[in-house]
Amino acid sequence: MSSLIEKYHISKRYPSSIDINIQKTEFLAKINNDGKIFLVGSNGKFTEIEFSKIQLPFIFGNPVIDDFIILKTIIDQSKISYNEIKNFYFFPSKRWDLELKDNTIIKLSDNNIQKSLSLATKFLHNDKFKDVKVIDARIKNQVILND
């Protein structure tokens, strides 16, 4: 059950009371680990599920979960809504691709995710580029578009 807890605080109120404050973790994504599906919590822990109607992005690959939490933080600070993301793809080179619900793929660089995401969003939310299905922002200060 500790995988469901983000943080907690216990304090004693004299003479005979205890206050316990528990904050539940937020589920961020689903991942397959050893053939089982888990929910990834904002606390970095896995919670096994058998069936869930929860609509969350799926993580493909084998990332260190702390790296995913960092990516989530960067996305939250960007102009992309986390709700737009359908899937995350993690590569052994420690690079991420994002697949959006409209099937657009954003290829992020491995060393400056924040800047490559910022470059990609300039094209993503521009009507001139609405038919583009791949936004490749892996090369520094360059974006390659494919439709």
Image: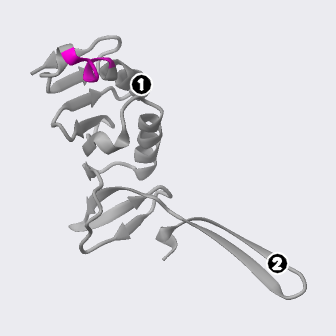
Identify whether 57 is placed above or below 12. Answer: above
Quarter placement of the C terminus: top left
Question: What residue range appears in magenta?
Answer: 122-127
- The residue positioned 28% from the left and 22% from the top of the image is 125
Q: Is mark 1 on a helix, strand or loop?
A: loop
- Identify the residue at horizontal 39%, vertical 50% (top origin): 64
Sequence order check, earlier mark of 1 and 2: 2
User: In this rendering, which labeled residue sits more in front, label 1 or label 2?
Assistant: 2
Question: From the viewer's perspective, is 73 left or right of 91?
Answer: right
Furthest residue in direction right, as rendered: 15
Kindly tell me whether residue 115 is visible in this rendering: yes
Q: Is residue 96 magenta?
A: no
Label 1 is placed on what type of residue?
A: Asn
* Rendered view: 137 above or below 23: above
Q: Residue 112 carries which label?
A: 1
**How many residues crowd mark 2 within 10 Å: few (<14), some (14–19), many (20+)?**
few
132 is higher (above) or lower (below) than 142: below
Q: Which residue is located at x 34 percent, y 14 percent?
A: 140
Looking at the image, residue 36 sits to the left or right of residue 8; the answer is left
Q: Mark 2 points at which residue?
A: 12
In 3D space, how far apart are the residues under numbered discs 1 and 2 (Cα atoms)? 46 Å
Q: Report the magenta stretch's main SS.
A: helix
Horizontal and vertical percent position of residue 81: 36, 37
Rendering quarter of residue 30:
bottom left
Disc ID at residue 19: none
